[in-house]
Image: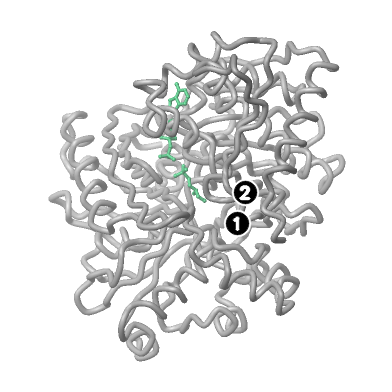
Amino acid sequence: MPAGHILALDQGTTSTRAILFRTPELSPVAVAQQEFRQHYPASGWVEHEAEDLWDSSLAVMREALARAGLRPQDIAGIGIANQRETTLVWDRRTGRPIHRAIVWQDRRTAAACAELREAGHAAAVAASTGLLIDPYFSATKIAWLLDHVAGAREAAERGELAFGTVDSFLLWQLTGGKVHATDATNAARTLLFDIRAGGWDAAMCALFRVPMAMLPEVRDCAAEFGTTDVLGAAIPVLGIAGDQQAATIGQACFRPGMLKSTYGTGCFALLNTGEAPVASRHRLLTTIAYQLDGRRTYALEGAIFVAGAAVQWLRDGLGLIGDAAESGALAARSDPVQRCYLVPAFVGLGVPHWDAEARGAIHGLTRATGPADFARAALESVGYQTRDLLTAMQADMAGLGDGAVLRVDGGMVASDWTMQFLADILGAPVDRPVVRETTALGAAYLAGLRAGLCPAPEEFARAWQLDRRFTPGMEMAEREAAYAGWQRAVRRTLSGIL
Ligand SMILES: Nc1ncnc2c1ncn2[C@@H]1O[C@H](COP(=O)(O)OP(=O)(O)O)[C@@H](O)[C@H]1O
Ligand SMILES: O=P(O)(O)OC[C@H](O)CO
């Protein structure tokens, strides 16, 4: 297999990273990262400046090249992984966005979603898209933009505006407006895509009032997405996947029953269910894990909106720590006798509750509660929420996934304390790989596969390497009592609106 380098761009919720990988083994040779500003214009609203997404992408790609001492001609291809659902609408003539990006966490369309649910559309939406009607997904965000930006709806109907998730927007920028495309995994997060047929669904577009003229062309995850010359030489874009799907690929979860969970801003667990989609009876999402050579592999997904974001809140909101990495040591100093629960419903709750109106709460405070107990409650909330969603997965897929080991990745898995609690509360082992940048790895693999520089999935899977296995150490009685307390805390936090 010939050698070459692949540039992976991982555009996440709080930061943008570029990682250069050497093929065929995909070893990382240089990394560059930039954080960018979050905008919270109203309670439950979250926006990103489109310019920040593009500028940080360009800056980190250039920096990674410079750090590796490589020339743009040395790059065989680019793979993109991106925060999903985040919605951009731009003018096709100027490339200028009509508004800031509305981020996946944004809840402004909660009432619109409730109306659609009350009108009885949930079953039809689930049958086509595999999703629930929730503000999390793109469709109601697009409609909001068309309804709130002057003249936008008319312009969209005339075909003058383009919609894209972040991958699609970056691709447009990279190709100088020549390519308006996305991949099947990102399309599957819009509420407009028929995941079985693999195409945009006209009935869904009508229901959510999104003109089809705005929509990008949908391609495989490893495909020709056009070329870019922004780095100084023509480089093809050869891979695109939503970041959670890219992490599923990076974790080599290619066989049905394999499961990964990524701990970044939020937490997202994906269980490979094979080539037939599985409808959830426990409010999980049915989604596309990847599409290669026109063939779709499906996944069941559990989505938690706040994981690492709770640690950011300890740092930025409460000022209890100066750096995320201090959270584990602080939690370790907490009083073991106290049980304080943080339900981090800062932007509502996802699986299995789907309560967009719920807001965060802390239960079990006493006069003795201090910063260490807050830190512990924040880290533990990630473990409890993971158990919630794995319980739902097991109920949906009896047999499949039983005895499966959870493969974890994302920024938060650096915390040994959190990973140990996760294994304890699940009562199951948790495997952390050597390469924790699995999202970028998955994007690089897609591009490397298309470039003919990376091996087939089975061989790539054999290269997956364990860094550390966390094995459960908590007594069953303690585990079940702690989890029962969490469930009570969640019940008290639900908005009661649903
Ligand atoms: N050592 C650590 N302990 C706990 N949380 C951490 C640690 N390091 C990073 N994090 C959390 O991980 C998140 C960053 O992970 P990352 O995968 O980069 O997120 P994203 O892709 O969503 O931007 C942040 O929310 C941060 O608070
Ligand atoms: O940016 P992350 O890693 O928190 O991922 C965000 C998800 O793609 C949202 O669905």
Q: Amino acid at mark 2?
A: Leu
Reply above or below: 138 against 330.
below
Marker disc for residue 349: 2
Q: Amino acid at mark 1?
A: Ala
Name the one closer to the observer, 5 or 228: 228
Q: Residue at x 71, y 18 (%)?
A: 424
In x, y percent, where is residue 82? 42, 50
Reply above or below: 43 against 384.
below
In x, y percent, where is residue 311? 47, 29
Picture quadrant of residue 443: top left
Name the one closer to the observer, 214 or 443: 214
Quarter of the image with the C terminus is: bottom right
Marker disc for residue 356: 1
Name the one closer to the observer, 411 or 467: 411
Q: Residue at x 32, y 39 (%)?
A: 17
Lateral position of residue 457 relative to residue 230, left or right:
right
